[in-house]
Amino acid sequence: MSTVTVEKIKTIKTLNAIAESGLKVFNKDSFTIDNESENPDAVVVRSFNMHALEFGDQLKAIARAGAGVNNIPVDKCTEQGIVVFNTPGANANAVKEMVLTSLIASSRNLFAGIAWTKGLEVEGDQIPKLVEAGKKQFVGKEIKGKTLGVIGLGAIGALVANDALDLDMDVIGFDPFISVDTAWNLSRNVQRAMTIEQLYAESDYITVHVPFTPDTKGMFNKETFSIMKPGVHILNFSRGELVNEVDMAVALEDGIVGEYITDFPNENVLQMKNTIAIPHLGASTQESEENCAIMASRQVKEFLETGNIKNSVNFPNASLPYTGKTRVTAFHRNVPNMVGQITSAISSYDLNIADMVNRSRGDYAYTMIDIDNEVNGDILPAIEEKINQIEGIVTARII
């Protein structure tokens, strides 16, 4: 059953602790934060698992203060006409710094060396002598002049690639879906790998920055390890599921992979040889949490107030300058004559269309229409009913 609603004071619910700087985006005149609400207009969330939740009929948007949306039932949201946002790039600098820190530290055996030194605390005045005698076991390698392979050149991957060049590394990148905006931000000195196999074969270090999908699941496995240089270091700050852990354990034992650095520890990972397991700290900085909260809140606010969509993972991105005119928005099936039916419903009330935009994404599309006339609020229910009768409408709003 499609729904059409007229705007009112909007209720925002948070399912995790969201930085106060983000919540301040919602001005008190138009929004209220109510974490007990069972039927909010929007939800701002971090890692809370939403798959078992039932959604109220007023829920219009969910914003994930982060990049991954595995904790949100995106398909269910699409079917119910709920837009899902994420915040790509908001935590990119934090993750980039962690990748580069781990890259250098693992090459210099820094983590193992620190742990060993800590174990000497009971040796008293013998510690300096023991340090000098034992430090040779931690002799490492410099990253200067080595080749870093970057898989995925989005917001994080591009930053890692550019900064690795400044550290005098050779950088080779692979991303068949690189965006124009990212390409502009990427140094021309990043070499392009024509295939991912080329990157595997040429890299001394490999860092991966791609989402977890059926195509990327287990992309690091026995077959791909066989292509790599012996002793390659692999850094995974994207998703644990990108690695076949059984194959990784064997590759580490055999020295095919020299070091595995991951932000996703589990029972298997902690039993692997030559593995540095970081407790999911990639984006855990105060600045990152604030950036994600602010970006998520701004996207929700913009959508609720104007209908404009940016950084959605399930709706098409669409923007139309908001001039204060009455605006009709509709999320609908991407089938012929939908726009014609919506505009006919509006014009049947002697209303002129000032501007409009229509964007599609797969089986669905999103339409925004600004009405030129000054609209009498009394006819809004009639417009609502007319739009509601159109087959293929999922949700519609009058702003």
Image (cartoon, rainbow, N blue to C red):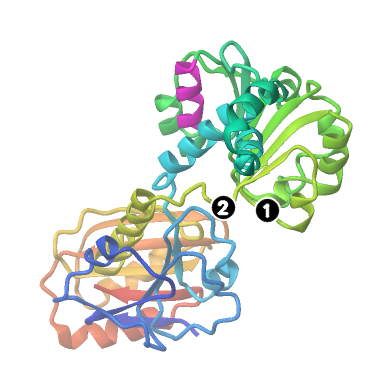
- The region drawn magenta spans 158-167
Residue 124: quarter of image: top right
- Check the image and name the residue furthest to the front: 125
Mark 1 Cα shell of 10 Å, populated few (<14), some (14-19), many (≥20): some
Mark 2 Cα shell of 10 Å, populated few (<14), some (14-19), many (≥20): few
Residue bearing mark 2: 280
- Check the image and name the residue furthest to the top: 145
Q: Residue at x 88, y 39 (%)?
A: 250
Q: What's the residue type where badge 1 is placed?
A: Pro
Q: Residue at x 76, y 20 (%)?
A: 201
Q: Secondary structure at mark 2?
A: loop
Q: Are the residues flagged by discs 2 and 1 in contact, CB closer than 8 Å?
A: yes
Is residue 154 visible in the rendered image? The answer is no
Is residue 358 visible in the rendered image? The answer is yes
Q: Nearer the viewer, residue 267 or 115?
A: 115
Q: Position of residue 144 (x, y in %)?
A: 56, 13
Q: Is residue 228 magenta?
A: no
Q: Is residue 161 magenta?
A: yes
Q: Position of residue 113 (x, y in %)?
A: 64, 33
Q: Position of residue 9 (x, y in %)?
A: 22, 81
Q: Which sits earlier in the primary sequence, circle 2 or circle 1?
A: 1
Q: What's the residue type where badge 2 is placed?
A: His
Residue 397: quarter of image: bottom left
Q: Residue at x 75, y 50 (%)?
A: 269
Mark 2–mark 1 distance (CA, rounded to whole Å):
8 Å
Q: Nearer the viewer, residue 204 or 88?
A: 204
Looking at the image, residue 130 sits to the left or right of residue 153; the answer is right
Q: Position of residue 361 (x, y in %)?
A: 51, 55
362 above or below 168? below
Residue bearing mark 1: 265
- For the stretch drawn in magenta, the main secondary structure is helix
Q: Nearer the viewer, residue 180 or 371?
A: 180
